Image: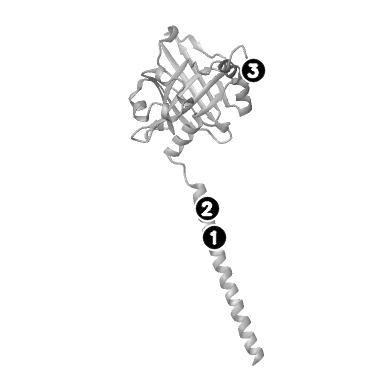
Amino acid sequence: MCTGSVSGSDSGTNGWSRARGVVLKTLVLIGGALWLKRMTKSTTRWDHTRIVAESLAGEKFSREQASRDPDNFFNLRWLSCPAAEMVDGSKVLYFEQAFWRTPLKPFRQRFFLVKPCPKEMKCDVEFRTYAIRDVEEYKNFCDRPKDQQPQPEEVIGDISEHLTTIYLKRCERGKRCLYEGSTPPEGFPNTWNGASYCTSELAVLKNNEIQTWDRGYDDDGNQIWGGKGGPYEFKPAPASSFNDMLSPFKTSLSA
């Protein structure tokens, strides 16, 4: 009887262990399936928009490129930050460009508008640039405290002339870029410095790096302005390097 009783207890214990093992395996399989589904879930059009907008934002410099090829490239400061959001969810960013020695004197100011490409087009993100109604009011926008910046409703009201549109696609696997694109071959009207039209190329790379190539042409297709040696390469600068770059500016402020 004692043996029989012990045998019955062992059988129950073994049965429970087997049942518990089946339950654990089932949970592991379900958890794995959910994780796999999450990892393989397709990226939405708005996910692409968010990635591009976040990559465009921030402070970047062409310092490395200018050091490597000073005859063709200047050390420029790229500065961009979120400024507003449209009713349809499109992201509006303020952008300015300056020589690194004079960061508070931008020579180019724009609004960027980033949104998903229309469904009928074979692209992922539509990137538009616009003139600003009053550029002086927005100078050094990103460097100011929030309460000293024009508010989102003001920003939307100050979006002026449409300048260019670039259609971005996800880069093929194995390439350095995440997204790349260009204006249509015919470009957009541009009369600066005697040009008739301009073209733009944009590449969003890993680590929030940006490559951009803007060029102006006359009616005969001759290049009037813009880089001839390739696109500008903007990289986020380490904090220490940034402090070194701004040291002349800081010195002039303290003088």
Question: Which residue is label 3 attached to?
Answer: 67
The disc labelled 3 sits on which kind of residue? Ser
Query: Of marks 2 and 3, which one's residue comes earlier in the chain?
Result: 2
Amino acid carrying mark 2 in the image: Trp
Name which residue lies at 52% across and 48% down.
Answer: 39
Q: Is residue 82 visible?
A: no
Count neighbours of disc 3 (C-alpha within 10 A) and say few if under 14, some if 14 to 19, many if 20 or more.
few
Considering only order in the chain, which callout, 2 or 1, is on the residue closer to the N terminus? 1
Give the residue drawn at x 49%, y 25%. 143
Q: How is the image coloured?
A: one colour
The quadrant of the picture occupied by the N terminus is bottom right
Per the model, the C-alpha gap separating discs 3 and 1 is 54 Å
Q: Position of residue 47 (x, y in %)?
A: 45, 39
- The residue under label 1 is 29
Percent across and percent down for residue 236 are 57, 28
Q: Which mark is residue 35?
A: 2
Mark 1 is on which residue type? Leu
Residue situated in front as seen by the camera: 70 or 133: 133
**Residue lying farthest to the bottom in this orientation:** 1
Is residue 170 placed above or below 215 in the rendered structure? below
**Residues marked 1 and 2 touching at CB (< 8 Å):** no
Quadrant where the C terminus sits is top right
Q: In the image shown, does 28 or 90 lie closer to the viewer?
A: 90
In percent of width and height, residue 249 lies at: 57, 17
Q: Secondary structure at mark 2?
A: helix
- Does 48 appear above or below 191? below
